[in-house]
Image (spheres, rainbow, N blue to C red):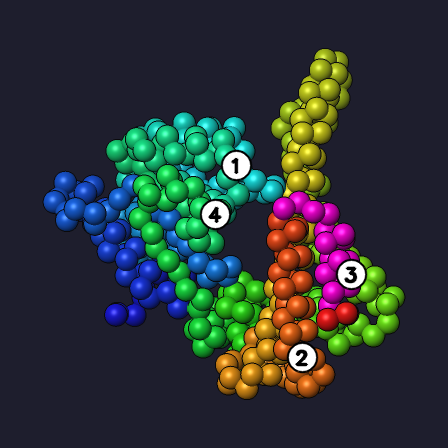
Amino acid sequence: MSTPIGVWTELVGQEPAMETLSSAARAAAKIVAGEPVAPGAMTHAWLLTGPPGSGRSVAARTFAAALQCSTGTGCGACPGCRTTMAGTHADVRLVAPEGLSISVAEMRALVQAAARRPSTGDWQVVVIEDADRLTEGASNALLKAVEEPPERTVFLLCAPSDHPEDVSVTIRSRCRLVPLRTPPPEAIAQVLMARDGLEADRAHWAASVCGGHVGRARRLATDEATRQRRATVLRIPLGLRRPSDVFTCADQLISAAEADAGEESKVRDESERSELRTAMGGDGIGKGVGGAKRAAEAAVKQLEKRQKSRSTRTQRDTLDLSLVDLAAFYRDVLVTTARSGATLNHPDHASEIESAASAWTPESTLRRLEAVLECREAIGLNVKPRIAVEAMVTTLRQG
């Protein structure tokens, strides 16, 4: 396959998916030009699946840019490509849930807007990140649009898998599936060096420990706090010596997630509140502003409710990353015990992994791994994180 150019350089280690999407973009350009295309070359609904960090949303935005490209190839230089990648194209709607789910009201409004004809581009494109967070009502609202799509509207759904727990069977059956794979470490390292200007040693280290997550690799390579959080998590397996360590380690995991969410949300939340008050005249003075102030305060309360939901989601996502690191440690212990020769997820902690493999039986290691996976599942089912984490850490100590 030829070297990717234009917007397609955003896709890291996804050559098969890139070939599928770029071919569809070329077919879409022919449709716009009134030229014939092969049946199925371009369709109105797509489902992009892959593990966290594989670049589902990046692939969707890249495809959206190619659809709006004036050359039909995703050149990366035309206004259609640039505005789509920047998130400012008038005919590309990006749905990224800030709370724990996507509501039916949000989806109905989106479907209604997507039914309009394109205003500046060739297509109306709707990108739904985390389609697995659709509520049942939202899924039903989307299904109606996917079943009877407007002529120039394209839906791009992103989800971890096409399993019914992630995407309903009825929606899945109406979408063309594009599976993404975990990018190889070498491809991630090359991106970090080329785009971020990182030194080779730092780039290759981050690529080797990120679990195939491009964004995580970038954060590990550039942010000391992220590196410290990872180090704290990986001290837990061999640091559970006394009963009190259970609560100490659990508190460290929860506190790190809360701190990360608070740091990310603080500046953004205050800026949003200030902008909303100004837009509604809540900061005005003089006669007749009492009604505006009351309306502004009511709107701010609604905004704060959404911000709280967003913060909760950020906390859980951050905690989940820590649990993924923890699960990978126990996986590495099993790999080492079996002497399988498989690549470690945490090669920079090989000595600790070897120590654990010598001290634990395979059965106890597997019980610890299962405890981490059960904790992730429990938090996904809205069990209070602290309760789930304390139960998990208790099992980690007992083995």
Which mark, by number, is residue 250? Answer: 3
The crowd level at tag 1 (other Cα within 10 Å; few <14, some 14-19, many 20+) is some
What is the tally of numbered marks visible in this picture?
A: 4
What type of secondary structure mainly makes up the magenta span? helix
Magenta highlight range = 381-396
Residue 17: x and y, percent?
33, 60
Tell me if residue 16 can be seen: yes
Q: Does 386 lie within the magenta span?
A: yes
Give the amino acid at mark 2: Thr
Name the residue beneath numbered marker 1. 135
In this rendering, is residue 285 above or below 96?
Answer: above
Q: Earlier in the sequence, mark 4 or mark 1?
A: 1
Q: Earlier in the sequence, mark 3 or mark 2?
A: 3
In this rendering, is residue 10 above or below 158?
Answer: below
Which mark, by number, is residue 166? Answer: 4
Which mark, by number, is residue 314? Answer: none
Front label number (1 vs 2): 2
Give the amino acid at mark 4: Asp
Q: Which type of secondary structure does the marked residue at label 1 adopt?
A: loop
Q: Does 11 lie within the magenta span?
A: no
Image quarter (top left, top right, bottom left or bottom right) of the N terminus = bottom left
Q: Earlier in the sequence, mark 2 or mark 4?
A: 4
